[in-house]
């Protein structure tokens, strides 16, 4: 876990500099500068610029804009005119003078050799920190090479202005012939003697890992500027950095060169830039305030944010992978013994683990996979609240119980060549999806057997690997006993589980088989436009994606693409079974996915189907089209119906194909002979709360048997509770001639501890 | 089925009265007053409490 967290933090590019800042000798915080310019905060933008470059008027005049060459807008329309924006900041700032800081004098005397722009920049920064600074210049004027390239009125005024609050010694016409006298008098020296200047016999080449200014082999002596071949802007920036190197030496005694400017690793998400026209100054030279704000607004303030753009979880909670990794770290390994600070428990249980983030991340960081590992770690520690997954684990237990699950050889008695494994939810959505598919498969290949059950995904999503293995192992054993046949799966999640955890099994999705059969669908789409909503679990199954599309085209439907499909398919919200841990987010996600496309969806995952039905989105399963079922759109089954349908499916299939396997009277759906009458409004409420009819009946019978119940004389109703798994469920009921009437039921997670 | 209604214990036939009761969730144990039978200790939690304060505390404990 620790290693994975470090790996995510190292690889995530969120904190990388934008391209412009990376190319800028000053590493100007362009994102922040632009943000201030966008809102017309010229004074504040100027302050940031001035603090970064030291001499704002000189830099605004001479900046050669290396950022223009790397601005990604250059490949789309035109790079951002950052220099014009700098000039606008300078022109429209209310106050362009330096700030005055009333600081006490600092210990440490520094000599700067050369009053060119590099030396002056170093002197300015150290003087403003109240070190004693003396500048030695062999000529009779300050400015060095600036005299060759800029109007002296501009740079002399900027130098005057920036030094206006500082005291420093300036020794003009004072050539320095050797360092020894300076080293006796000063604690630090910056050699900035300009292009072709004297380096006093010290090396002027930077090592492979070094930046400039260079730490020389003389303690306290640093060297930089045009002397090392730097351009004027680089020389200025090196002067600013030299002040930090010298201060570092004064404080620590360590001689460290400036850090090398590493190029940014930033990557932009595709589609991040939308075409705009560059803003040209109407005056020809300088932006008006409005023009400056408009040009600044063209800047997209580059950030590697593909994950947060595409992932529902990261965009909803506004958290980048680095932040999530940190939160998971302190949650899984809290710093205190009582586990305080487990901030990400719910977040861990909120990820659909769909893998989209890894797909869109330029570094392929799969946070879903990481959060799955976090979930497992939390489960192993017993720190994941049981309530987040208990309902679904009970559903899995039901699906794998003899009430719904079974395995049978080909009804024809032939050798088993394939086994149809529809998964646990397909029959719950509509039993005909299973029965019709099986009938069709038998027509294609009489040696097809049938296994109905759950692949174990709910256990994996709950982080319970031991339980997951308990589900997987019998599946593998059954497959071996059946002679290692091909498995035909209907659920893309099952396929993902099988290929990852049971790779020895040869699997194929049902839809590939249907498309390959060449049988026409009974339905004619007559050009109806639909969109295929690819399930996240099938993002790497291009053949299946195409199989579904070809089935639809052959049935006469027209297809409209969705923004997210194929490789970048998004989860409908079912993945990870997150809706108990994060009901609000889960609803938001389902709603968002429903609105991704205006046309009805065709899905090939029954969970996608049921999520969209619940959200009110017109949706059909590809099996609806292939077998001519469910007309326009079916209703979403309730949790009670889902159980009953699976039981009925087993009963019907066994009766039809394997009557010899029928076990009359064994482990019926409801052991009780009592009938529970539930008014429709109560039923709807129960479904919303995931409370099951059979559990309510069990609680009532328990209350009746023990006599432990409360009477409400006003209504004549009985009230009692029972524990269903970890949950405590309450029932309000009355006796009826056939059994009971349920008036209300609700539950809580807290356990009542009777003393 | 709100608190103000008089409720009777189905077993003992006596009126339910507020009494301290122990609850536990995720390893945390706490006591609070709910309606109980003074004779046999039968507990009653109204829906308003289960969906209100109890659900709030459950969420707090899950996020702790």
Image (spheres, rainbow, N blue to C red):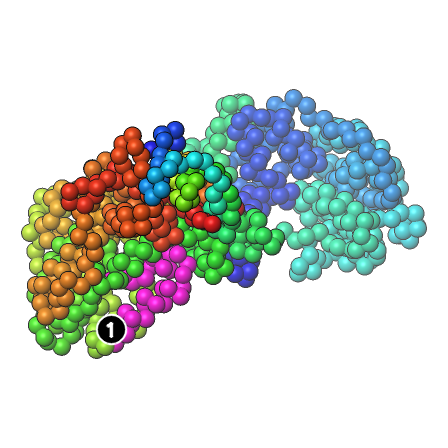
A529, above or below A201, in the image:
above
Secondary structure character of the magenta stretch overall = helix
Residue A339 picture location, percent across and down: 56, 52
Residue drawn at x 68%, y 23% is A95
Residue neighbourhood size for the residue with mark 1, other residues' Cα within 10 Å, grouped as few (<14), some (14–19), many (≥20):
some
A708, above or below A39, in the image:
below
Residue drawn at x 6%, y 51% is A522
Residue B62 picture location, percent across and down: 47, 47
The residue where tag 1 is placed is A479
Relative to A674, is B46 on the left or the right? right
The magenta stretch is A453-480
Relative to A578, is B21 on the left or the right? right
Quadrant of residue A127 within the rendered picture? top right
Q: Secondary structure at mark 1?
A: helix
Relative to A225, is A649 on the left or the right? left
Q: Is residue A454 magenta?
A: yes
Relative to A753, is A193 on the left or the right? right
């Amino acid at each position: 876990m620790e290693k994975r967290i470090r790996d995510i933090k190292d690889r995530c590019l969120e904190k990388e500099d934008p391209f412009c800042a990376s190319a800028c000798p000053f590493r100007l915080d362009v994102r922040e500068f632009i943000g201030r310019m966008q809102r017309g905060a010229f004074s504040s933008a100027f302050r940031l610029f001035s603090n970064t470059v030291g001499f704002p008027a000189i830099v605004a005049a001479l900046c050669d804009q290396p950022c223009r060459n790397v601005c990604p807008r250059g490949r789309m329309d035109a790079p951002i005119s950052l220099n014009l924006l700098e000039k606008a900041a300078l022109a429209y700032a209310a106050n362009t003078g330096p700030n005055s800081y009333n600081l006490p004098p600092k210990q440490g005397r520094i000599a700067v050799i050369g009053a060119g722009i590099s030396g002056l920049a170093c002197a300015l920064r150290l003087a403003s920190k109240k070190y004693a600074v003396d500048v030695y210049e062999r000529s009779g004027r300050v400015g060095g090479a600036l005299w060759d390239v800029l109007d002296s009125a501009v740079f002399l005024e900027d130098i005057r202005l920036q030094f206006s609050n500082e005291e420093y010694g300036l020794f003009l016409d004072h050539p320095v012939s050797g360092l020894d006298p300076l080293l006796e008098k000063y604690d630090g020296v910056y050699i900035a003697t300009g292009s072709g200047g004297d380096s006093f016999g010290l090396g002027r080449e930077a090592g492979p890992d070094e930046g400039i200014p260079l730490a020389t082999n003389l303690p306290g002596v640093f060297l930089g500027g045009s002397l090392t071949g730097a351009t004027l802007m680089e020389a200025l920036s090196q002067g600013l950095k030299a002040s930090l190197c010298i201060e570092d030496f004064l404080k620590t005694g360590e001689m460290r060169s400036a850090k090398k400017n590493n190029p940014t690793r930033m990557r932009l998400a595709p589609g991040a830039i939308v075409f705009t026209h560059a803003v040209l100054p109407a005056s020809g030279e300088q932006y008006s305030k409005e023009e400056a704000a408009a040009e600044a607004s063209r800047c997209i303030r580059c950030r590697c944010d593909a994950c947060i753009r595409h992932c529902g979880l990261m965009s909803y909670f506004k958290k980048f992978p680095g932040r999530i990794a940190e939160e998971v770290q302190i949650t899984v390994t809290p710093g205190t013994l009582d586990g305080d600070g487990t901030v990400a428990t719910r977040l861990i249980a909120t990820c659909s683990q769909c893998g989209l983030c890894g797909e869109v991340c330029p570094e392929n960081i799969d946070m879903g996979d990481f959060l799955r590992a976090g979930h497992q770690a939390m489960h192993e520690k017993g720190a994941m609240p049981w309530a987040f997954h208990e309902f679904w684990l009970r559903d899995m237990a039901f699906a794998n119980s003899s009430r719904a699950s079974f395995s049978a050889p080909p009804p024809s008695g032939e050798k088993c060549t394939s086994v149809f494994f529809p998964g646990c939810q397909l029959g719950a959505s509509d039993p005909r999806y299973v029965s019709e598919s099986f009938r069709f498969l038998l027509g294609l290949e009489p040696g097809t057997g049938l296994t109905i059950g759950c692949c174990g995904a709910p256990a994996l999503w709950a982080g319970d690997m031991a339980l997951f293995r308990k589900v997987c192992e019998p599946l593998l054993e059954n497959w071996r006993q059946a002679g290692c046949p091909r498995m035909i799966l209907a659920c893309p999640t099952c396929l993902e589980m099988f290929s990852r955890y049971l790779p020895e099994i040869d699997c194929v999705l049902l839809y590939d088989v249907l498309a390959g059969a060449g049988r026409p669908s009974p339905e004619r789409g007559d050009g109806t436009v639909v969109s295929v909503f690819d399930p996240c679990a099938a993002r790497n199954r291009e053949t299946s994606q195409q199989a579904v599309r070809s089935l639809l085209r052959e049935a006469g439907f027209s297809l409209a693409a969705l923004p997210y499909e194929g490789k970048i398919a998004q989860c409908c919200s079912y993945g990870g079974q997150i809706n108990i841990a994060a009901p609000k987010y889960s609803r938001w996600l389902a709603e968002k996915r429903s609105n991704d496309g205006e046309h009805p969806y065709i899905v090939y995952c029954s969970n996608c189907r049921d999520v969209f039905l619940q959200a009110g989105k017109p949706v059909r399963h590809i099996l609806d089209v292939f077998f001519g079922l469910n007309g326009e759109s079916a209703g979403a089954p309730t949790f009670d119906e889902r159980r009953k349908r699976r039981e009925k499916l087993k009963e019907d299939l066994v009766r039809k194909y394997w009557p010899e396997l029928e076990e009359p009277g064994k482990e019926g759906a409801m052991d009780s002979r009592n009938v529970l009458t539930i008014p429709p409004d109560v039923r709807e409420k129960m479904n919303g709360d995931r409370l099951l009819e059979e559990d309510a009946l069990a609680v009532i019978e328990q209350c009746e048997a023990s006599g432990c119940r409360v009477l409400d004389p006003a209504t004549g109703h009985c009230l009692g509770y029972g524990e269903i798994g970890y949950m405590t469920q309450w029932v309000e009921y009355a006796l009826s001639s056939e059994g009971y009437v349920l008036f209300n039921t609700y539950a809580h997670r807290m356990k009542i501890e009777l003393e | 089925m709100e608190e103000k209604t008089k409720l009777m214990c189905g077993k003992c036939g006596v009126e339910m009265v507020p009494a301290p009761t122990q609850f536990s969730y995720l390893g945390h144990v706490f006591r609070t007053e709910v309606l109980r039978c003074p004779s046999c200790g039968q507990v009653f939690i109204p829906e308003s409490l289960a969906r209100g304060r109890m659900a709030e505390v459950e969420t707090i404990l899950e996020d702790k």
